[in-house]
Image (spheres, rainbow, N blue to C red):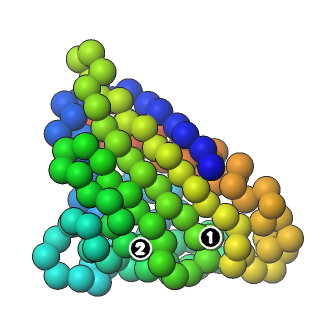
Amino acid sequence: MFTITTDIERPPGEVFDFIATIPNSPRWFSAVTGVEPLSEGGVGEGARYRFERNLPSGPAVNEVEVTEYTPQSAITLTSRSGPTPFSYRFSVAPQGSSTRVTLHGEISGEGLGGVFGLLKGAAPALFERGMRSNLETLKAQLERR
């Protein structure tokens, strides 16, 4: 389990809306190459998506569900199938003139194949480092707007 925070010089509503627009994920999640909605009705608790990912062990697919959705405040994405089970909770809050994004993450290396399967104990630390980089990409994209 890990927690990462970053401050983004944009209004909270804009930051939340970008994160909660799940098809934006490939723009800032380095491992995500595509997102396809699997349910009707847009984002909200219970919405499901197919995430195509490039992992160190090769291409992978996860079915991901929105397991928490509090408009303009928090969203949790939880994998329901596929390798590297994860749960990512993103919350946003005003922080002075910017927005603080806090990510509480849980991820495991279960399901990694080949030589990478041997490293699954180290996977959480590697994924945490990757998520730090992803949040920096999110920050850079939103601050360029």
Q: Amino acid at mark 1?
A: Thr
Question: In screen coordinates, is 58 left or right of 35?
Answer: right
Determine which quarter of the picture holds residue 63: bottom left
Local crowd size for mark 2, using a 10 Å CA cut-off: few (<14), some (14–19), many (≥20): many
Kindly give the residue lying farthest to the top in the view shown: 96
Determine which quarter of the picture holds residue 13: top left
Cα distance between the residues tagged 2 and 1? 12 Å
Q: Is residue 20 visible?
A: yes
Q: Residue at x 19, y 44 (%)?
A: 72
> Which of these two is toward me, 50 or 30?
50
Residue 49: % across, % down: 34, 76
Q: Earlier in the sequence, mark 2 or mark 1?
A: 2
Q: Residue at x 35, y 30 (%)?
A: 100
Quick one: SS at disc 2?
strand
Q: Residue at x 55, y 64 (%)?
A: 86
Residue 117: % across, % down: 80, 74
Report which residue position mark 2 lands on. Answer: 64
* Disc number placed over residue 84 in the picture, else none: 1
Q: Is residue 109 above or below residue 76?
A: below
In the rendered image, the quadrant that contains the C terminus is top left
Residue 44: % across, % down: 21, 65
Quick one: SS at disc 1?
loop
Q: Is residue 18 visible?
A: no
Q: Amino acid at mark 2?
A: Val
> Which of these two is toward me, 144 or 10?
10
Local crowd size for mark 1, using a 10 Å CA cut-off: few (<14), some (14–19), many (≥20): many
Question: In screen coordinates, is 80 left or right of 84?
Answer: left
